[in-house]
Amino acid sequence: MPAEVWYSGLATAGKIRDTFIMKYLFITPMDDEDFVELFVKDCKYYDKTNVELNTILSLVTFKSNDTIIDIGAGIGRLAIPLSKHIKVTAIDTNKALLSHIKEPNTRIINGKIEKLNPIDKFDYDLIAWPGFNNYEEVLAHIKEKILKKTGKLIIVKSKQHDLKSITQKLFPELFGKEKGLLEVLPNFFEIEAEKIVWTEWVYPSFDEALRLIIFELEAFYGKTISKSQKPIVEHFIMEHEKEGKIHLSANLNVIICSPKK
Ligand SMILES: C[S@@+](CC[C@H](N)C(=O)[O-])C[C@H]1O[C@@H](n2cnc3c(N)ncnc32)[C@H](O)[C@@H]1O
């Protein structure tokens, strides 16, 4: 399908999302097949060296009977490989994304983490690429109801992202208003270890990068990219072209924390 058709479809989907969801939330209507397909596709071009998983494994030593809950697990990008090392529960508000997790020994919960009240608390909680707008509530709930007192919270979060150079240009109204995860974190958790690692997306062509980057921007920020903004995205993509492929990079914080006493 030509990029233009995808683009206008996404713009419409973006408008719908804009009216129904709050900024920064990754919640979409359950029947939004475009969203799920594009999310899955975008993940295929990302982190080919498994740097996220390998960094987690270098910072913590899991025992096979330990339990972890992947909070906002998406399609199980990390939950699936982690299930080879530890007992995994994957929770997400988006049922369609969760349907990609088919490992028999992985428990799936479709719902909001803020509403979960498990009988057995977890040894580890994972939050990777968080998309919440209520970090105070989520972190307080994790500390009180989800994680054992001796447990560890693992966070994987972008620190610097090539896309940030245009997101501030595209959506200046969204910046500097809400408290981010790392700002709220010290109220509930203490950082024990941290690594900064580099990772990247490699898109095979300009058109593929255009449709997926517009999707990412619209889904993550809950905003529509207007026709007049599109050249900003196109220019950005051309700047990141090397031998026909588009390379976008990000530095990530991989953080291990324990609940504050
Ligand atoms: C940016 S995605 C990250 C997905 C996955 N962690 C990864 O790294 O591939 C954020 C995910 O959080 C989920 N999510 C948002 N709010 C949530 C909530 N309150 N409880 C559980 N999941 C939530 C979204 O549906 C989405 O799949």
Image (cartoon, rainbow, N blue to C red):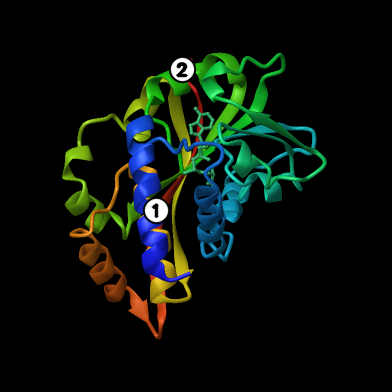
Q: Is any atom of residue 116 visible in this view?
A: yes
Residue identifier under label 2: 140
Residue pictured at 40% horizontal, 68% vertical: 3
Residue pictured at 52% horizontal, 19% vertical: 114
Q: Is any atom of residue 175 visible in this view?
A: no
Occupied quadrant, residue 210: bottom left
Instruction: Report whether 167 appears left or right of 29.
Output: left
Q: Looking at numbered disc 1 in the image, what kind of residue is underneath it?
A: Leu
Instruction: Report whether 189 appears left or right of 210.
Output: right
- Closest to the observer, 66 or 217: 217
- Would you call the spot at circle 2 few (<14 residues within 10 Å), some (14-19), or many (20 or more)? some
Instruction: Report whether 250 appears left or right of 33.
Output: left
Residue 10's disc number: 1
Residue 61 position within the rendered picture, expressed as x and y whole percent measured from the top left: 67, 42
Occupied quadrant, residue 14: top left
Q: Looking at numbered disc 2 in the image, what kind of residue is underneath it?
A: Ala
Q: Earlier in the sequence, mark 1 or mark 2?
A: 1
Residue 148 position within the rendered picture, expressed as x and y whole percent measured from the top left: 63, 20
Please tell me whether mark 2 sits on a helix, a strand or a loop.
Answer: helix
